[in-house]
Amino acid sequence: MARTTDSDLAPHELRVLVAVADTGGFSAAARALGLTQSAVSHSVRGSERKIGAVLFDRGRSGARPTPAGEKAVAHARRILRLLDVLTAEARGAARSDAAQGPLRIAAFRSAALHLLPPVLERLRARHPGIEPRVRIVREVGRGTAGEVADGKADLAIATLGGSVPLPPGLVASGLFEEPYSLVHAAGHATPRSLPLVDWAENCGSYTRDWWAAQDWIPKATVEAEDDGAVLSLVSAGHGMAIMPALSLAGAPDTVGIADLGPERPTRRVGYVTTAELAGSAVVRACVRELRATAVPLRPPAGILPTALPT
């Protein structure tokens, strides 16, 4: 039988590390955990001694994870989540329904609005014991996949194949590929002459080469916070935009959508989870519903995403 050693971190020590990182200080973490500040300080010092690295920079403004601390906290979140899954699945197995408990999902805005609602509806109908918790995360930098890597989400709806590599320990699979279209105010005779409206999450590495080859696309003169704001500005006649199909689901009649032709760019949408959680009942149940929902997903103007092989 495997035995714990003095260098092993106990679950309560992991919870302290996460609390300090989440609250930004030892005092705040103590309040959140119902401990004294000295107990939190003692626990962190013990964890640092066991790991052999300083995990937090202490200062008057609080405590901030060092690079070693960021790694430790991310692993701590993932380990604590696995302990929760262990308990939930063991209890569920005793009741003949292992798919129960919280399911933390990170999604970019258009996926949360147009892909997840039918998924969650089917999930609740089949597995009423699952408790979905959805966070909308901007798909820039590490994006939604970064939430999974940091232990803040169990599963992410993400754009795949970009320039940012998948963090170690994660697995990904495609759901569908969606085309980009030219979007403009309905009825405009020469939409390509309009100024460009854009947002930070658009034009990832999967579209950049195509984008650079289009001499008719000007530099963006209007930049919005998200694709919903872009659609509103375009609808009001403030310019045109190049947008993926999922962002155009439910677009109003005041918006015109034009095909960009056979060489149009596409965006691959899929899910990301950890290698450990991929086999959990809650994640597997959600993935089944994602696949069932994604294949018949129909964006506007009759554009149908092409399902990727599983």
Image (spheres, rainbow, N blue to C red):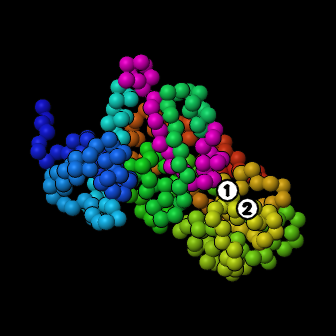
Q: Where is residue 214 in the image (x, y as percent from the top left)?
A: 67, 77
Query: Total label count?
Result: 2
Report if residue 241 is visible in the image: yes
The answer to whether residue 44 of the structure is visible from this angle is no
| Label 1 residue SS | helix
Residue wearing tag 2? 231
Q: Considering depth in this image, is 169 or 7 the residue closer to the camera?
A: 7
| Residue sitting at x 66%, y 42% | 296
Tell me the element at label 2. helix
Nearer-the-camera pick, 188 or 181: 188
Question: In this rendering, would 96 be left or right of 191?
Answer: left
Residue 224 horizontal side relative to residue 99, left or right = right
* Kind of residue indicated by mark 2: Leu
Q: Position of residue 264 (x, y in %)?
A: 67, 66
Highlighted magenta segment, given as a residue range: 91-118
Residue 203 image-quadrant placement: bottom right
User: Percent from the top left, x then y, of residue 286?
Assistant: 51, 37
Q: Residue furthest top?
A: 95
- The residue nearer to you, when weighing 122 against 30, is 30
Q: What residue type is labelled 1?
A: Ser
Q: Indicate whether 148 appears above or below 239.
A: above
Q: Which residue is drawn at 45% across and 32% down?
A: 101
Which quadrant of the figure has residue 90? top left
Q: Do the residues labelled 1 and 2 touch (CB within 8 Å)?
A: yes
The residue beneath circle 1 is: 247
95 in magenta: yes
The answer to whether 238 is drawn above or below residue 288 in the figure is: below
N-terminal label among 1 and 2: 2
Residue at 70% across, 71% down: 197
Callout 1: few (<14), some (14-19), or many (20+) C-alpha neighbours within 10 Å?
A: many
